[in-house]
Image: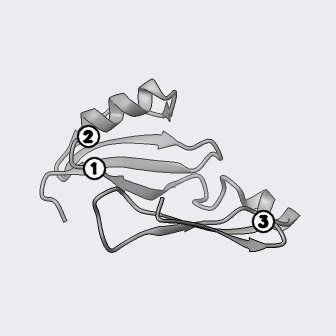
Amino acid sequence: MIEDTDLGEGNRWVLVRPKGHGGTAIVLAEAKNETEKKMIGGQGAERVFLFLHTDDFYRDYDNFLEKDVTFLEEPREEAYGTVAVFQDKFGNKWDLLELKIPI
């Protein structure tokens, strides 16, 4: 976590990025109203829309399994790399992905 700032009135600014990496980060926000809450887990319309890149697929895959992360498939080798789809606690689908040629 890079930042966790209380913005008042129940709002927080939470910024996360992998350790040791500069550049890209994501902001996490909590759903506040019924419309937003109904969208939780459905942002990707039942498709993978989040990609978690790793430099060591099986290290992270095994670590996730130890933490009871739900994988929806077994790891598979594709032309572009090693990948498996997992689901977060809100129902969002992610690719855990180690590219053969890192970006």
State left or right for residue 94 relative to residue 90: left
Circle 2 packing at 10 Å, graded few (<14), some (14-19), many (20+), is some
**What percent of the width, then of the height, locates residue 23?**
32, 74
Image: 60 above or below 14: above
Q: Which mark is residue 57?
A: 2
Residue at figure coordinates x 70%, y 56% from the top left: 40
For badge 2, the amino acid type reads Phe
For badge 3, the amino acid type reads Glu
Determine whether label 2 and label 1 are within 8 Å by CB: yes
User: Closer to the N terminus: mark 3 or mark 1?
Assistant: 3
Could you tell me which secondary element the residue under label 3 belongs to? helix
Label 3: which residue? 36
**What percent of the width, then of the height, locates residue 38?**
79, 58
Nearest the viewer among 6 and 96 is 6
* Residue farthest left in this picture: 101
Which of the 4 quarters of the picture holds residue 91? top right
